[in-house]
Amino acid sequence: MNKNFTQYAFTESVKKAQSRYGTRKTYERMEASGDRFQLTAREALFIQSRDSFYMASIGENGWPYVQFRGGEPGFLKVIDELTLGYADFRGNGQYISTGNIEANRKVSLILMNYPNQQRLKIWAEASILEADEDHVLREQLENPDYKGQTERLVTLKVKAFDWNCPRHITPRYTVDEIRTLTNNTDTKQTPLYKPII
């Protein structure tokens, strides 16, 4: 069942902390604001323009693990208003997220837009297929121009999401974003800083 994110995030201990620090009344109103789980055009556009995200999974020993996932912008696909997916490339061979998901499908994602100080949090249940198990899905998730080797296909059933506070997000820029901002095609020719010595 898909819900308002507060039903996943606000456990009894969290509510006690909110009461202790004076934010409980505010978040009681948020809890009553209705379900927020179907991705709208706003979320879809944001997700499909990201070139990375962070995903937390939980090991059988109870320890959380956070993984960075990167690729070309749009490598995390919006399949429909409740489903995301991505081609899982060969990495360092530790398979921590893969193993964790096989034991516990619950994951959380954080997607960042650093220049605009935006952050989207997603609660989801992950499923993993080997790359050759579903050719239609593989074609949907793969970018044939990307050099990474696909090992698995990961789908994420969205349970809830929340746009998070922009406070304390330090703006960061990619090389392409800096080039756009400076209208310069070669950032190596024009230093973006002055030596202090």
Image: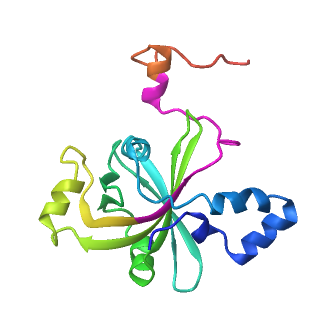
Could you tell whether 177 is left or right of 6 in the image? left
Q: Is residue 192 above or below residue 43?
A: above
* Left or right of 151, for residue 162: right
Residue sitting farthest toward the left = 135
The percent coordinates of residue 33 (x first, y second) are 60, 57
* Residue that appears at 57% across and 73% down: 64
Q: Depth check: 1 or 46 in front?
A: 1
Residue 26 shown in magenta:
no
From the viewer's perspective, is 57 left or right of 48? right
In this view, 99 is above or below 176: below
Residue 118 in the image: state x and y as whole percent: 56, 41
Q: Is 116 placed left or right of 142 in the picture?
A: right
User: Which region shows up in magenta?
Assistant: 158-178
> Where, quadrant-wise, is the C terminus in this rendering?
top right
Q: The N terminus lies in which quarter of the figure? A: bottom left
| Residue 165 belongs to the span the image colors magenta | yes
